[in-house]
């Protein structure tokens, strides 16, 4: 038994070298629709695969079925798959779920900016940084009336004001919030 635990621990350590994002849960990244996941099941090549999270937040895994991944961390999805597969596999399955592409973590900037659009986010980003990605405000922008729209879990939207002029002067810094996936910055 002790030798088996050492073997599993060694395997997990080695996998962290090949799939480093799987072990980056310290920040608690929540999986989004559109993200690409790599599912690796030790000694079960037919079950290992790359999957894209569907718009409904689910992924399909052979034997495990439909797994809800959206809004969960890679560790939580790993555990869900491990438990589901343990019903069918004699030995306790060793499962690793890693993020291969963060394609579902997107913020949007629209309105009177130089380059409106959708911007993939691979690190925490605040409103001012997203506006910089969009090339800054154009000369017709109302910098005092910018809104960040966020969709809540229940489907409603919340509007949060952002005063670009105040931020430039070092005031109201609390409005320069960290954006979440799906946030929309509207520059009138």
Image (cartoon, rainbow, N blue to C red):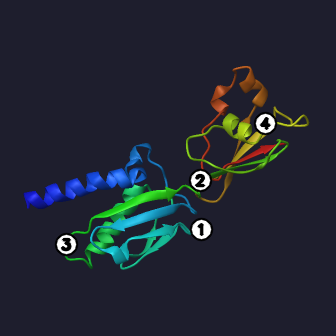
Quarter of image, res 3: bottom left
> For the residues carrying marks 3 and 1, which lies nearer the camera in this image?
3
Disc 1 residue crowd, few under 14, some 14–19, many 20+, Cα 10 Å: few
Residue closest to the eye, 101 or 168: 101
Image check: 50 left or right of 96? Answer: right
Determine whether 89 is above or below 17 in the image.
below
Mark 3 or 1, nearer chain start: 1
Residue closest to the eye, 32 or 1: 1
> What distance separates the C-alpha of mark 2 from that of mark 3?
35 Å
Q: How many marks?
A: 4
Mark 4 or 2, nearer chain start: 2
Q: Position of residue 165 (x, y in %)?
A: 78, 26
Disc 4 residue crowd, few under 14, some 14–19, many 20+, Cα 10 Å: some
Disc 2 residue crowd, few under 14, some 14–19, many 20+, Cα 10 Å: many
Image check: 43 left or right of 146? Answer: left
Mark 1 or 2, nearer chain start: 1
- Quadrant of the drawing holding the N terminus: bottom left
Query: Which residue lies under the disc numbered 1?
Result: 55
Query: Which residue lies under the disc numbered 3?
Result: 91
Mark 4 or 1, nearer chain start: 1
Q: Which mark is residue 136?
A: 4
Q: Position of residue 126 (x, y in %)?
A: 63, 37
Q: Which mark is residue 5?
A: none
The extreme right residue here reads 140
Q: Secondary structure at mark 3?
A: loop
């Amino acid at each position: 038994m002790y030798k088996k635990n050492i073997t599993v621990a060694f395997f997990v350590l080695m996998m962290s070298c090949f799939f480093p994002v799987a072990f980056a849960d310290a920040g608690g990244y929540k999986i989004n629709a559109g993200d690409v996941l790599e599912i690796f099941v030790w000694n079960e090549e037919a079950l290992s695969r790359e999957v894209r999270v569907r718009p409904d937040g689910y992924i399909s895994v052979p034997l495990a079925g439909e797994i809800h991944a959206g809004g969960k961390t890679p560790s939580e999805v790993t555990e869900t798959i491990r438990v589901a597969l343990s019903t069918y596999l004699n030995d306790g399955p060793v499962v690793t779920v890693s993020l291969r592409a963060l394609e579902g973590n997107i913020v949007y900037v629209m309105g009177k900016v130089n380059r409106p659009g959708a911007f993939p986010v691979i690190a925490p980003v605040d409103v001012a940084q997203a506006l910089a990605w969009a090339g800054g405000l154009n000369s017709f922008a109302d910098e005092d009336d910018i809104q960040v729209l966020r969709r809540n879990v229940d489907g409603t939207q919340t509007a949060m004001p952002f005063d670009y002029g105040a931020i430039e002067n070092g005031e109201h810094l609390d409005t320069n919030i960290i954006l979440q996936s799906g946030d929309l910055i509207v520059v009138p």
